[in-house]
Amino acid sequence: MSYTINNTIYATKKDIISQAQSILNKTKDHQEVSISDYNFLIELFKNHDEWEEKSKNECIGITAGRSLHGTRCFYLKTKTGLEDISFHYAIKCLKK
């Protein structure tokens, strides 16, 4: 089963994980991701079952940082602050 995200076809969910992890690894804490990475991540995060809630205050950027658990994750920058979001969970929610 293949998956299309931002007009790119990924053969497996592992391929999508690799792409998202690569973006996370190259993005320093509090640095915004590039436009192309932003577009990929937004399309991916739209699959997250809490997307509507997490993005309700208008997403104006995506950064990386440390979570409360000490792991690195992505944060949606909204008009009211930062909202953590899991790319692993968004991938888990992808429809076949």
Image (tube, helix red, strand yellow):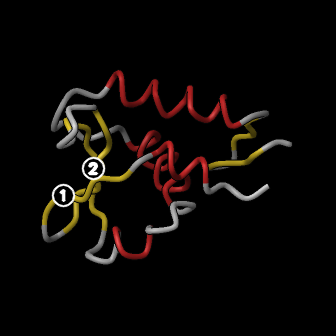
Left or right position of 11 against 30: right
Q: Quadrant of residue 69?
A: top left
Where does the C terminus fall, quadrant-wise?
Answer: bottom right
Where does the N terminus fall, quadrant-wise?
Answer: top right
Res. 55 mark: none
Residue in the picture at 47% in, 55% down: 42
Q: Quick one: 8 or 24, which is closer to the camera?
A: 24
Q: Which residue is mark 2?
A: 75
Residue in the picture at 47% in, 45% down: 87
Q: Are the two marked residues, 1 and 2, in contact with CB atoms closer than 8 angstroms?
A: yes
Secondary element at tag 2: strand
Within 10 angstroms of label 2, few (less than 14), some, or many (20 or more) residues? many
Residue in the picture at 27% in, 32% down: 71
Q: Quadrant of residue 76?
A: bottom left
Left or right position of 48 against 9: left
Whole-percent x and y of residue 24? 37, 30
Residue 75's place in the image compared with 28, above or below, is below
Q: Amino acid at mark 1?
A: Leu
Q: Which residue is mark 1?
A: 82
Whole-percent x and y of residue 25? 36, 22
Whole-percent x and y of residue 20? 49, 34
Distance (Cα) linking label 1 and label 2: 6 Å
Within 10 angstroms of label 1, few (less than 14), some, or many (20 or more) residues? some
Whole-percent x and y of residue 15? 66, 29
